[in-house]
Amino acid sequence: MFVALAAAAALASTAYAQSLNLSSSCQSTLGSIATGPDGTCLNAAGLVTFATVNSNSSLITPLNSWLTGMCSQSQCSNQTLANIVSNITSGCSSDLSSLGFSSSSTSTVVSDVQQFYPTVREIVCLKNTTSNNLCATDLLTDVQNSVGTLSQNNLQQIVVSIIGGSQTLESVLNSASCSDCFKAAYNVINTNFPSLMTSAERSNFTSTCGANFTNGQNPSTVSQTAAGLSSANGSTSGALAAFPVTSLALALSALASAFAFFA
Ligand SMILES: *[C@@H]1O[C@H](CO)[C@@H](O)[C@H](O)[C@H]1NC(C)=O
Ligand SMILES: *[C@@H]1O[C@H](CO)[C@@H](O)[C@H](O)[C@H]1NC(C)=O
Ligand SMILES: *[C@@H]1O[C@H](CO)[C@@H](O)[C@H](O)[C@H]1NC(C)=O
Ligand SMILES: *[C@@H]1O[C@H](CO)[C@@H](O)[C@H](O)[C@H]1NC(C)=O
Ligand SMILES: *[C@@H]1O[C@H](CO)[C@@H](O)[C@H](O)[C@H]1NC(C)=O
Ligand SMILES: *[C@@H]1O[C@H](CO)[C@@H](O)[C@H](O)[C@H]1NC(C)=O
Ligand SMILES: *[C@@H]1O[C@H](CO)[C@@H](O)[C@H](O)[C@H]1NC(C)=O
């Protein structure tokens, strides 16, 4: 799970670096999504705040305002997600092909995004009611305090050192991994994808974080801020063979490209 996320983050940051040089058709595609109705549920227009950030300044504040705005929007419909993904994969095809993406994968990416987006949205919209910040923002702030400013100019270098096995980062993540925020995220994943985690992984969490971590109760110190959340819950059936790293990475890459476009 964490390995999959790390791999996705690595790919996304590579895309981020490359995307400082987006093709013009990709730029206009992203621009029309940001200004069009399909972008509203992702608060795509909020990505414009990234334009005001100096390349040496932290990206956490604009990221936090973008996420906060996104959480207050209703959930994207499957149709909207399909429009966004297919617009990006066609408008940005030359940019994405340099990441190994072929447009024949579009329908797979669409259905993976449709399947995982509600869960990702629920997780990034979790809020620490003590600090009154999004859990993601608090976590990134802790990461930044240990590895240095998460700025556009530093990002790639930081990711490279993370892939090389940064011990400072590992200790931040280890100390965060049994927190109430992670417990709430763990509950979201287990509720939406009951078969994603193996029983060995579950008992690993129990032995690392204590029996309360896996008791399924939502911690009172964490609240859900995603608008209209009830519709996102429940509807889960399938056994997932594997977490779709490629699709997640492409989704993150597209997002990262959008950041860079507006930066
Ligand atoms: C930017 O993209 C163009 C066309 O794809 C390419 O020729 C050029 O080398 C790229 N520049 C950089 C700095 O990557
Ligand atoms: C970012 O920092 C570098 C090194 O300190 C400096 O050379 C550069 O001018 C700064 N860029 C901006 C946009 O402030
Ligand atoms: C882009 O999305 C719009 C809906 O917003 C849709 O009508 C159009 O067909 C899409 N374009 C492509 C190339 O997928
Ligand atoms: C959206 O699509 C996914 C897979 O493509 C499906 O599992 C899910 O049930 C759909 N959601 C709705 C609300 O139709
Ligand atoms: C929530 O915020 C408080 C106050 O800043 C902090 O002490 C606590 O560690 C945070 N909890 C999580 C799960 O991050
Ligand atoms: C359990 O955790 C340890 C380290 O914390 C890890 O090396 C091991 O692979 C994990 N086992 C499973 C089944 O996830
Ligand atoms: C586990 O949860 C119970 C009730 O929810 C609580 O009384 C107990 O103190 C918790 N144990 C730990 C180690 O947090």
Image (tube, helix red, strand yellow):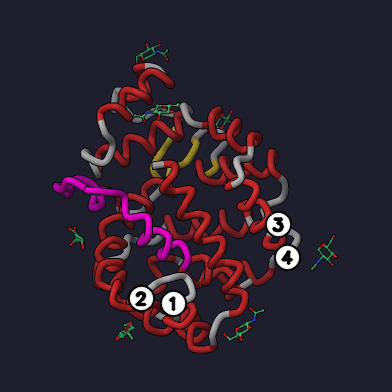
Q: Report the side of 57 relative to 75 (left or right).
A: right
State which region is magenta. 230-253
- Residue 156 on image: x %, y %: 64, 58
Q: Quadrant where the N terminus lies? A: top left
- What number is the disc on residue 97? 1
Ligand 1 located in image quadrant: bottom right
- What number is the disc on residue 154? 3
Residue placed under numbered mark 4 in the picture: 55
**Label 2 lies in ligand 3 vicinity (Cβ under 8 Å):** no
- Of the numbered discs 1 and 3, the one sitting upstream in the chain is 1
Which SS class for mark 1? Answer: helix
Tags 1 and 2 touching, CB below 8 Å = yes
* Few, some or many residues within 10 Å of mark 3 (<14, 14–19, 20+): some
Residue shown at 41%/38% (left/top)?
Answer: 223
Q: Report the side of 228 relative to 144 (left or right).
A: left
Q: Quadrant where the C terminus lies? A: bottom right
- Tell which tag, 4 or 3, sits nearer the viewer: 3
Residue shown at 61%/52% (left/top)?
Answer: 159
Residue placed under numbered mark 2 in the picture: 102
Residue shown at 67%/44% (left/top)?
Answer: 144
- Tell which tag, 1 or 3, sits nearer the viewer: 1
Q: Amino acid at mark 4?
A: Ser
Residue 145, by quadrant, is top right
Q: CA distance from mark 1 to mark 4?
A: 27 Å
Which SS class for mark 4? Answer: loop
